[in-house]
Amino acid sequence: YAVQMVRSYLDNPQMSITQIADEMHFSSVSYFCRYVAKHLGMSPGQYRASLIPG
């Protein structure tokens, strides 16, 4: 469930990585980034970049 929430937040370009980490109650942005990398296989920035066509 949490991974789905992460994806939906990352799909929203209006929210910063810091805002998402805060919204999901991660203790730090770096921990959030490690969590995303572990579960999605890429950093939050890479995930967002993969959504941009081309």
Image (cartoon, rainbow, N blue to C red):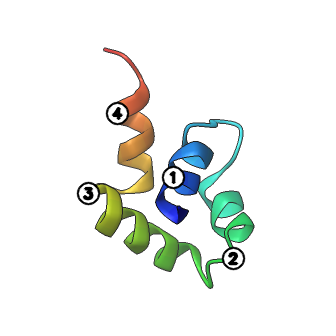
Identity of the residue drawn at 71% across and 70% down = 22
For the residue pair 23 and 46, the one nearer the viewer reads as 23
Q: CA distance from mark 4 to mark 2?
A: 25 Å
Mark closest to the chain's N terminus, 2 or 1: 1
Q: At which x and y percent is residue 36?
A: 41, 63
Q: Amino acid at mark 1?
A: Gln
Give the amino acid type for the residue marked by disc 2 in the picture.
Answer: His
Q: Amino acid at mark 3?
A: Gly
| Quadrant of res 21 | bottom right
Splitting the image into 4 quarters, where does residue 38 fall?
Answer: bottom left
Mark-to-mark CA distance, 1 and 4: 16 Å
Question: Is 22 positioned to the left or the right of 54 in the image?
Answer: right
Quadrant including the C terminus: top left
Neighbour tally class for label 1: few under 14, some 14-19, many 20 plus, Cα within 10 Å:
few
Dot label at residue 41: 3
Q: Which residue is mark 1?
A: 4
Q: Nearer the viewer, mark 2 or mark 1?
A: 1
Residue displayed at 73% across by 65% down: 23
Disc 3: CA contacts within 10 A as few (<14), some (14-19) or many (>=20): few
**Mark 4, residue position:** 50
Pick whichever of labels 3 and 4 is earlier in the sequence.
3
Disc 3/disc 4 C-alpha distance (Å): 12 Å
Of pointers 1 and 4, the one earlier in the residue sequence: 1
Q: Residue furthest front?
A: 1
Find disc 2 in the rendering and name its residue.
25
